[in-house]
Image (spheres, helix red, strand yellow):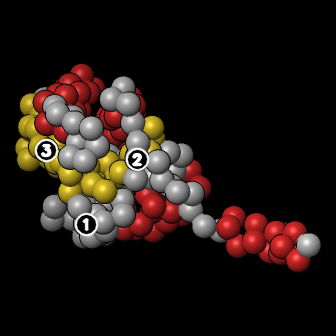
Amino acid sequence: MSFLRALPALAVLLVGLPAAAAPNDVAVFGIELAEPGTIGPRPLKPQDARRLGLATDALRREVASRGLDPVDLAPQAAAIRRDAPFYKCEGCAEKIAQAAGAALVVYGYVQRSAPQVLNLTITVTEAGSGKVLRGGQVVIQGDTDDTWLHGVRSLVKNRLFAEPLPNRS
């Protein structure tokens, strides 16, 4: 009987804990624009913002097509805004992913080398340990929607998921 009285208190404690991560749950963060040499955040050009959105959507689709389940990061929006950019934050993406119930983390960025030459880098890590499982970079020649999307698809296919992830097969 006393156990039954303790259930509501136990339920309140458990609600605040992140859900146990399933091995295929993945946090796919938005692809960011890295602008070396700039101090402080700079507003994105409309075409860059649109292409980052297109590339991120393509990355989520590619990840999902490989049998991984992207988790909803909307409840983590405040932490994402606070800690971004993830290519600089040293482990904060993994902490956010764990809070969202993900076992894996996928994040990336685009860096402009020249007006028509961009580098796309994407990294896959374990949320619990931060261990890098895979990473890759591709050069995008041409600053168009099609070249950005081709870069994402090529990197995912030929580098990130060419073989099963270590300890995930």
How much space separates mark 2 and mark 1, taking CA atoms?
A: 26 Å
How much space separates mark 3 and mark 2, taking CA atoms?
A: 22 Å
- What residue appears at the point 33 percent right and 29 percent down from the top-left corner? 66
Q: Taking 31 as reference, is 70 left or right?
A: right
**Coordinates of residue 52 in the picture (x, y in percent):** 33, 40
Q: Secondary structure at mark 2?
A: loop
How much space separates mark 3 and mark 1, taking CA atoms?
A: 16 Å
Eye-nearest disc, 3 or 1: 3
- Quadrant position of the N terminus in the picture: bottom right
Residue 42, can we see it?
no
Residue 37, can we see it?
yes
Say which residue label 2 marks. Answer: 23
Q: Secondary structure at mark 3?
A: strand
Q: Amino acid at mark 1?
A: Lys
Q: Amino acid at mark 3?
A: Gly
- What residue appears at the point 23 percent right and 27 percent down from the top-left corner? 153
**Coordinates of residue 138 in the picture (x, y in percent):** 11, 38
Q: Which mark is residue 40?
A: none
Name the N-terminal-most of marks 3 and 1: 1
Q: Which mark is residue 88?
A: 1
Residue that lies at the very extreme toward the front in this rendered image: 1
Q: Where 75 falls versus 122 (above or below)?
A: below
Q: Amino acid at mark 2?
A: Pro
Say which residue label 3 marks. Answer: 136
- What residue appears at the point 70 percent right and 73 percent down from the top-left corner? 13
Q: Taking 7 as reference, is 141 left or right?
A: left
